[in-house]
Image: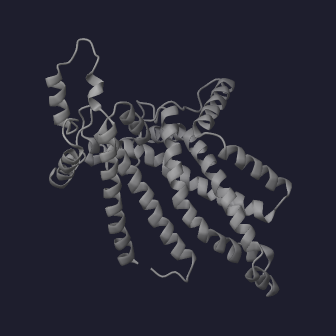
Amino acid sequence: MILYVLRRFVNYLILTCVATTFSYMAASTFLNPAKKYQGVNPPVPEESIAALMRKYGVYREDPVALRTWNWIENIVTAPFHEKLGMSLSNKWVITEMLGKPENALTFWQIEWLGRAGVSLRLLLIGSLLGAILGVILGVWGAVRQYKFSDQVISYASFILISTPTFVGGLLLMILATHLNRLLGFQLIRFSGAYSPGYEGWGAIWDLGIHLLLPTIALMMFGAAGYSRYQRAVMLDVLGSDFIRTARAKGATRTRALIKHGVRVALIPMSTYFAYQFGTLIAGSTFLEVIFSWAGMGQYGIQAVQTSDINAMAGVVCFASVLVLFASTLSEILYAALDPRVRM
């Protein structure tokens, strides 16, 4: 088991490096960071712009291959916080992504892992709750096929799947505004990841209140996709011979469904989880912008708007690590659910 995980970790580490390198090459080819300084008044001398671009390692007159080689060399030789270079805001990319090293283990604090910590709170909680809710709704819809509850779940899922994530976030903000107005005080806060000035349990409560709406949005959109897939797989399992055999041996309907049906139906679901996690990362990016969260999604959009090549490579590296971590987790779940699979 440990050897398998280590082997997969090495494979995924190589894939992450390849994905990040290709993203750096693509960004270096198509983006021009110097345009930030062009057309400003008073004009910036070309020599000063060229010196700045060389400092960041993104000078366009240098060939892309040379810039990529220098970037890889920097990753190998530079200290950890300098490995991905400096963004156009004159900050080290890794420091901006992961925050200060002394806060790396204090996950209950706001400063935990910098921008990455802000995104991870939303992604992990939202995707986990979405997967659990989606499985429950999918199983319920399959067991109650074509009944009223199944129809409601199906129509609601199709509406959510066809609705952009940012629209769902805006609708939740409108509902929260009306609720706060009705109560006469601000129960739900949705602007920013936290409110400054709180400490201790007050800070944790404030963090949870700000986390509420984005988590609900991500959970609902994730559950919509999970429920449709789980329902289809569960319908196939319900018609299987081993379910009829279990009932013939005296197992109750509930026991046959939970012990034999749901467990088998969860096996392909574990693979679907890795695929769906990538779409949730994209959805959380728009939610971070709508709810003014200073996370990795907002960082990535700012990097595209300002043509910040080093920052964009850092965001791609972060997304690659998350997707590959989800893939490893799905393989472990697959092996745990199916005893025929050996690691």
> At 81% from the left edge and 62% from the top edge, which residue is drawn?
144
**Residue 97 versus residue 190 in the image, above or below:** below
* Residue drawn at 55 percent across, 83 percent down: 340
Q: Is 284 left or right of 93, judged from the image as shown?
A: right
Instruction: Give the quarter of the figure containing the N terminus.
Output: bottom left
Q: Position of residue 165 (x, y in %)?
A: 59, 40
**In the figure, is residue 5 to the left or right of 135?**
left
Give the left or right position of residue 327, taking residue 25 as reference.
right
The residue located at (49%, 70%) in the rendering is: 331
Q: Nearer the viewer, residue 258 or 36?
A: 36
| Coloring applied to the structure | one colour
Reply above or below: 176 against 335. above
Residue most extreme to the top? 42
Residue drawn at the location 30% of the way across and 43% of the way down: 99
For residue 311, say whether it is visible: no
The image position of residue 305, as x and y in percent, is 39, 31
Nearer to us in this view, 237 or 32: 32
Q: Outermost residue toward the right? A: 147
**Can residue 11 be seen in this snapshot?**
yes
